[in-house]
Image (cartoon, coloured by chain):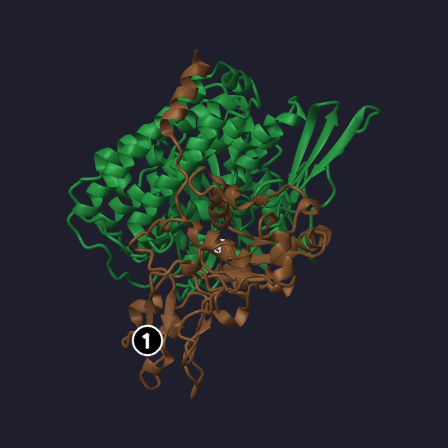
Chain colours: A brown, B green
């Protein structure tokens, strides 16, 4: 009887998986703001208003040099956006933020006002992982928000499994690591061992401001300032935490699984 | 108020000149604390404050039925003092922590070992408790666990399937939050508070903002207090819903697990409707809140909330309607009321063992002073009770939000606050979704933080998980663990 009811209820709910990436992505919350764009040529002479308000020292302006915003360190609190008198730093509303190289996250110079979105893996790796990617997640000082919004990708709304991407229990079953957290000193050994246990060839994805550069804890002696001080990183996904859509976009971008219009592969 | 105590009474979200905190010799502080705990007080926090080369101990007690908090401290000293843990096990982790942070030795502490200190590239775990015997075997799990989850190490002593003892070793997530606070607040302090435990952003940020506001001799404007209360209940709804789903998943009951995974996201998206971030980052600010909930937005909020509440009630019902699920949850991982009281559990874990403790009701601050909530209690202390208390709290948080969403609160959203008062102690407690979040700040002569103590509910509750495993099959560890769902980083700081 009860089993019967349960099944009926379940059927009534129907399929709740989103259309993306075939259809449009779900909209970001209106107050999210998305990615940032920084145009150092707009800065007033000698202005450093944004520098001290950034909690993670993501913005620098050395005397005589241009302003630079490091989205790898950014926690997207928008304090700089609020304080800038010139609109040199603005929100773009774009959920796409994943990059392949650390320096692609540094904004400010002409031609580099926005981050340089990730290109996919090379053909050999794409052949291997493009339709089946198993990841071992390692939280190394993560606050459980990056972890939670990664977990969410496994729920029925997002259904990561439909892309052949799966989080697995053992590093030996994995094609790569998915790291969150700044790599606390307490997790350094465990991370190294887990990395070593993943068979070659392998990839590493650093997710969240912590894993990219130490995030809110940058400079603390109890942490390493990000995963790439310990292991080589192939994909950086900024945010604190990144929206699930940003994470999914990063993964699909890396595997070249996005529809043409969303992809940067053409370049 | 009939309570007489040698401790200095203080309300939640209030301050006290540091000079007014009674100071006794350490033995006397331990004796007086023990006697208050014996007559029903609770140890909310116990920590050291460096004073020159010496350290003074501070005890923060909660008298829940009298609805007051109380503090006292020891004179500064070095060396050792008689352990409080011997009489009151709820002090055991605090005394280990004080020993690790300041070197004060609690004489007679039964299990003095590191709490979270890092030794090179791993935590200084110390030696593990070992049961000897021909049939006894040991199982080590972690730090890297099977799922997408934070790291910690579990050491089981088993006979066959049965767990005789579980020791939990943490510290893998230690990010140096407390140490960095000395001399603060700094520019990174607020975001660090928001990420002490990333799923408890609103509770910790509210506690921190309250500390700064009370040190400035003010309060957040009513509208901000109202918004914080709304966001706090949303945080509870999202996490409790996730927990129900996780419990269902662990007994392979997929309908509820699948539905709750989705509905949890609906609640997170409501938080994002408030402030753009699904975890409430950037919402609470010292002096108020950064975003408003205007009437039009409130209406959208309410519509979506109601749908999610109907959905989660239905998903919970599937769970309770399934006899095979209930059979798996009942009498599993039992923590008796006496045990829960003895080790000082807080939050839903305590309430599921029949204890009436809830900061919102016992020590209301902010909006909760005018919008009372009733604690959800269920006796039993088993996995079922911990699940059921969550389901009850989902209902009550839902009711609270529906009642409060159109409350009349005409005020500014945020005000500038003055610099923190010098040489002052401030306490702020918030009932986070896992239980009591307790922040204590002590300022120096310049008004900077001389000491800032954070006690996440998980600091109290990990011992409860260890106890729940006694006599339980090791294969039931995942369900017991989910039924507590404690924070690693909130403990490790
Ligand atoms: S990046 Fe932000 S959300 Fe992610 S683990 Fe670090 S503090 Fe938490």
Report the side of A76 relative to A220 (left or right): left
| In the image, residue B345 above or below residue A263 | above
In the rendered image, residue B213, in percent from the top left (x then y), is placed at 31, 55
Q: Quadrant of the N terminus of chain B?
A: top left
Indicate yes or no: mark 1 CB to ligand 1 under 8 Å: no
**Residue lying furthest right in this view?**
B134
Dot 1: chain letter: A
Image quadrant assignment for residue B130:
top right
Image quadrant assignment for residue B347:
top left
A157 or A213, nearer to the observer: A157
Report the side of A42 relative to B349 (left or right): left
| In the image, residue B64 above or below residue B443 | above
Residue drawn where x is 44% and y is 64% of the image: A74
Number of residues whose C-alpha sits closer than 10 Å to that of mark 1, classed few (under 14), some (14–19) or many (20 or more): many
Q: How many marks?
A: 1
B447 or B298, nearer to the observer: B298
In the rendered image, residue B128, in percent from the top left (x then y), is placed at 73, 39
In the rendered image, residue A135, in percent from the top left (x then y), is placed at 61, 48
Residue drawn where x is 42% and y is 50% of the image: A21
**Residue lying furthest bottom in this view?**
A64
Task: Tell me, yes or no, if residue B41 can be seen here.
Answer: no
In what element is the residue under mark 1?
Answer: loop
| In the image, residue A167 above or below residue A50 | above
Residue under label 1, please give it.
A88
B242 or A219, nearer to the observer: B242
Task: Tell me, yes or no, if residue B354 can be seen here.
Answer: yes
In the rendered image, residue A127, in percent from the top left (x then y), is placed at 62, 55
A213 or B265, nearer to the observer: B265
């Amino acid at each position: 009887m009860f089993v019967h009811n349960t099944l009926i209820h379940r059927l009534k709910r129907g399929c709740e998986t989103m259309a993306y990436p075939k259809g449009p992505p779900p909209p970001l919350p209106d107050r999210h703001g998305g990615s940032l764009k920084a145009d150092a040529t707009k800065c007033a002479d000698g202005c450093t208003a944004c520098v001290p308000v950034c909690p993670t020292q993501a913005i620098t302006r050395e005397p005589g040099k241009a302003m630079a915003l490091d989205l790898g360190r950014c926690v997207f609190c928008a304090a700089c956006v609020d304080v800038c008198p010139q609109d040199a730093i603005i929100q773009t509303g774009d959920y796409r933020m994943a990059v392949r190289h650390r320096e692609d996250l540094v904004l400010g110079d002409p031609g580099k006002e926005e981050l340089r979105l990730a290109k996919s893996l090379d053909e050999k790796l794409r052949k291997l992982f493009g339709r089946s990617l198993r990841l071992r997640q390692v939280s190394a000082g993560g606050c459980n928000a990056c972890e939670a919004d990664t977990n969410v990708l496994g729920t029925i709304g997002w259904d990561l499994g439909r892309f052949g991407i799966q989080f697995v229990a053992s590093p030996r079953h994995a094609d790569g690591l998915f790291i969150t957290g700044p790599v606390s000193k307490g997790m350094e050994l465990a991370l190294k061992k887990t990395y070593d246990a993943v068979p070659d060839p392998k990839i590493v994805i650093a997710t969240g401001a912590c894993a990219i550069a130490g995030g809110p804890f940058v400079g603390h002696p109890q942490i390493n300032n990000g995963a790439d001080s310990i292991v080589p990183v192939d994909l950086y996904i900024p945010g604190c935490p990144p929206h699930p859509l940003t994470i999914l976009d990063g993964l699909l971008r890396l595997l070249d699984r996005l529809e043409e219009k969303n992809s940067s592969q053409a370049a | 108020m009939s309570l007489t105590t040698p401790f200095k009474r203080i309300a939640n979200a209030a301050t006290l000149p540091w000079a007014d905190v009674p100071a006794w010799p350490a033995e006397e502080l331990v004796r007086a604390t023990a006697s208050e705990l014996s007559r029903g007080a609770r140890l909310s926090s116990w920590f050291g404050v460096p004073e020159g080369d010496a350290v003074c101990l501070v005890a923060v007690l909660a008298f829940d039925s009298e609805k007051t908090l109380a503090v006292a401290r020891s004179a500064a000293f070095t060396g050792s003092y008689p352990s409080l843990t011997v009489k009151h096990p709820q002090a055991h982790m605090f005394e280990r922590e004080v020993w690790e942070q300041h070197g004060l030795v609690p004489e007679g502490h039964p299990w003095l070992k590191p709490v979270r200190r890092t030794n090179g590239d791993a935590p200084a775990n110390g030696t593990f408790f070992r049961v000897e015997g021909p049939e006894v075997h040991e199982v080590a799990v972690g730090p890297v666990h099977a799922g997408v989850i934070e790291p910690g190490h579990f050491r089981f002593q088993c006979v066959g399937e049965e767990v005789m003892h579980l020791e939990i070793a943490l510290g893998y997530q230690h990010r140096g939050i407390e140490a960095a606070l000395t001399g603060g607040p700094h520019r990174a302090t607020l975001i660090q508070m928001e990420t002490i435990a990333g799923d408890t952003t609103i509770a910790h940020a509210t506690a921190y903002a309250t500390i700064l506001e009370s040190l400035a001799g003010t309060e957040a404007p009513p509208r901000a207090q109202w918004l914080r209360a709304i966001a706090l209940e949303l945080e509870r709804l999202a996490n409790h819903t996730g927990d129900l789903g996780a419990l269902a998943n662990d007994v392979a009951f997929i309908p509820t697990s699948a539905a709750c995974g989705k509905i949890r996201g609906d609640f997170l998206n409501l938080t994002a409707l408030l402030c753009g971030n699904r975890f409430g980052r950037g919402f609470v600010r010292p002096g108020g809140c950064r975003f408003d909930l205007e009437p039009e937005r409130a209406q959208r909020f309410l519509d979506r909330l109601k749908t999610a509440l109907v959905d989660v009630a239905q998903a919970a019902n599937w769970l309770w309607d399934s006899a095979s699920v209930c059979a798996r949850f009942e009498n599993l991982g039992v923590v008796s009321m006496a045990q829960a009281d003895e080790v000082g559990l807080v939050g839903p874990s305590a309430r599921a063992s029949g204890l009436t403790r809830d900061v919102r009701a016992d020590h209301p601050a902010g909006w909760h002073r005018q919008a009372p909530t009733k604690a959800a209690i269920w006796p039993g202390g088993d996995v079922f009770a911990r699940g059921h208390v969550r389901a009850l709290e989902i209902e009550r948080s839902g009711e609270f939000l529906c009642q409060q969403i159109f409350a009349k609160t005409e005020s500014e959203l945020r005000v500038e606050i003055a610099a923190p008062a010098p040489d002052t102690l401030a306490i702020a407690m918030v009932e986070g979704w896992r239980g009591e979040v307790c922040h204590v700040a002590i300022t120096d002569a310049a008004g900077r933080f001389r000491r800032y103590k954070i006690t996440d509910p998980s600091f109290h509750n990990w011992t409860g998980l260890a106890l729940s495993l006694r006599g339980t099959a090791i294969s039931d560890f995942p369900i017991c663990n989910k039924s507590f769902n404690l924070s690693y980083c909130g403990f490790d700081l």
